Image (cartoon, helix red, strand yellow):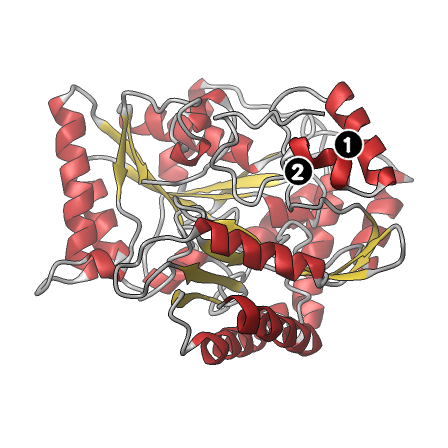
Amino acid sequence: MTSTLSRAIAHYPNRFDPGVLSELPRHLQETIRRRHKALGPGYTLIYKEPVEFVSGHGAHLIDRDGNDYLDAYNNVPCVGHAHPHVAEAVSRQMAAVNTNTRYVQEALVDYAERLLATFPEELSKLSIACSGSEANDLAMRVARFHTGGEGIIVTRWAYHGITREVASFSPTLGAGSPLGPNVRLIDAPDPRLVAPGSTLDEHMRQQVRGAIADLERHGHRLAALITDCAYSSDGIFTDPPGYMQAMVEEVHAAGGVYIADEVQSGFARLGESMWGFSRHGVLPDIVTMGKPMGNGLPISGVVFRPEVCEEFGQNVRYFNTFGGSSIPVAAGAAVLDVFEKENVRQRVLESGNALRAGLREITKDSPYVAEVRGAGLFVGVEIVKDRETLEPDRALTEDVINDMRDRRILINGTGESANTLKIRPPLAFDSADVSRFLETFAEVAKNRL
């Protein structure tokens, strides 16, 4: 198989090059050839040598030869791979019934009430879909209906989903997926971009204010600012908390709404609270959720302030065949059970603090590490050619990622230059996992950083 790398995936971090297929073990070669022949366009494998898994538990994945890999990348199995409580709840529901939201389901109402109880009381209406893309699509439909505007503001390398609508405001998808003429880009909240004498609050306020002015100049009234509260694709920027208030003030002054995309940053991922926006002391108008809700089952959600969605609900019918059906709801409820029984948020705080402290100690003298940043169990390690110039070093970043994979620890890259290590494990990541990760990273850093 010759290399088929195209501009569609040219920027994708740590991608597999099919041109080197013949160098892989025989069983992988055959499966990848069959995959290439059978699957549609756009699929991408990661790592120089892709890996196949057959089982998992907690923050661990097991390959077909029985090797244990530490998963420090996948946030979908939020409370851990194959968590027995979630598996049992889903199995029990599958053996009973699976109906949709056109029928009365007490379990659906119970779940909605429990999930909404984790939000500020002003956010009190829940719609359920199947994916983060669907959630963000619905959120933007409601925002447009409520405001009468079309303008959208996102950060420069944001990712919010893959539907045609959501792809139009997901710049990380690249040149093959053009942005809409109603979309304006602003900086991610990187404190290093702030001019001397200014503050991050003021910098972000001016970014939003300028985007609104440019939208209006081109005839687009503002509908929404949407941000991922960890800026996952921009390179992971979580601190300092508090700057969001200035941004939201500008959005509301222009008649728009603020959508907090919590698909990656929610469910206690950032440690201090259940939702990333809470760290900034702001109240979103709409919140979207996805991947972690069902620990691998396809369920996502949109939470609204009632006054934002009321008119939409009176005029537009919304139904999703699988969104809110019995089996995903059973998974979602089981995830909330685990959060309560295992004190997940405290584990995230403790493991995350230890992980970041260890990474900072290992890299403190490295000329190639610009920053270790993040919160909770969402960590970025920015790798550069020189600490002074901050010139990105994508090649070195991918060497580190693949060295870690060769030692059976899974991470990946992120950021516009794909030069930030993305460390985002299941929230089952415990102290033993932290120790294993840091010991292995220290070995790689000694050789590479």
Relative height, residue 292 to residue 339 (above, below): above
How far across and down, in percent of the image, does residue 272 sit?
47, 69
Q: CA distance from mark 2 to mark 1?
A: 9 Å
Considering every residue shown, the one lying at the far left of the view is 197
* Marker disc for residue 32: 1
Element under disc 2: loop
Mark 2–mark 1 contact, CB under 8 Å? yes
Residue shown at 10%/63% (left/top)? 196
Q: Where is residue 70 drawn, in percent x and y? A: 71, 63
User: Tag 1: Cα neighbours inside 10 Å, few (<14), some, or many (≥20)?
Assistant: some
Tell whether 352 sits left or right of 176.
right
Crowding at mark 2 (Cα within 10 Å: few <14, some 14-19, many 20+): some
Which quarter of the rendering shows the N terminus?
top right
Of the residues shown, which amino acid type is indicated by label 1? Answer: Ile
Based on the displayed image, in which of its 4 quarters is residue 278 positioned?
Answer: bottom left
**Residue at the (40%, 40%) spot, across then down:** 158
Rendering quarter of residue 195: bottom left
Residue 24 x, y percent position in the rendering: 77, 42
| Residue drawn at x 87%, y 46% as measured from the top left | 91
**x, y percent for residue 294:** 68, 47
Total numbered labels placed on residues in the image: 2
In the picture of the structure, the residue carrying the numbered disc 2 is: 45
Tag shown at residue 449: none
Camera-side residue of 207 and 192: 192
Q: Is residue 202 left or right of residue 167?
A: left
Report the side of 214 relative to 46 (left or right): left
Q: Is residue 332 visible?
A: yes
